[in-house]
Amino acid sequence: MRVTFLVYGVLYVVIEVVGYQLEQVTWPEITPLDVATALTNAFLTVVVLVGVLVGTDVLGHRWRRARALRRVEEARLATAEWADPGTIDVRSWRAEPVVPPLALPAARRRRSEGENAYADNAYARPAAPPGRLL
């Protein structure tokens, strides 16, 4: 039934395009070249319409397939998440221990902006006073 409607539709488009082309020329002046031109234009119109329909159908199938694959991947990830939930963190009901504030370090001298602006090394031993060596 669908094919029948499709064939009748194509024939209708061809007859309409041929009729319009031949209508542009007065009936006594119609030549075989005018008829061939009208038929060529009609079949070109049909081919372009069929190409658009086939392209739309192919893109629709690809889009549906990609959407189905994406849904399958989302379902697989959701299943994997439920299968292995990982570790469960449990919070303690005890209060956090109070940490005493740290003593502020002695003020570090900084060099001017033109020189190196890094602070002194906090872990370096102070230099021994000059004088006696053991």
Image (cartoon, rainbow, N blue to C red):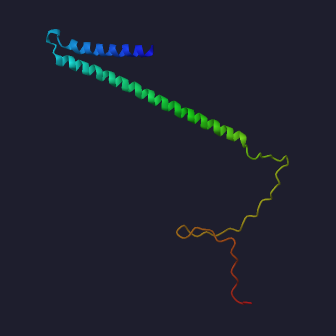
Q: Is residue 73 above or below residue 99?
A: above
Q: To which quarter of the image does residue 124 belong?
A: bottom right
| Image coords of residue 57 (percent x, y) | 45, 27
Q: Residue furthest left?
A: 29
Query: Which quadrant of the rendered structure holds the C terminus?
Result: bottom right
| Image coords of residue 16 (percent x, y) | 29, 13
Q: Is residue 19 above or below residue 75?
A: above
Residue plotted at (40% across, 16% down): 6
Q: Nearer the viewer, residue 123 or 117?
A: 123
Q: To which quarter of the image does residue 17 belong?
A: top left
Residue plotted at (73% across, 64% down): 104
Q: Nearer the viewer, residue 131 or 123?
A: 123
| Image coords of residue 98 (percent x, y) | 82, 55
Residue plotted at (21% across, 20% down): 37
Residue plotted at (37% across, 26% down): 51
| Image coords of residue 109 (percent x, y) | 63, 70
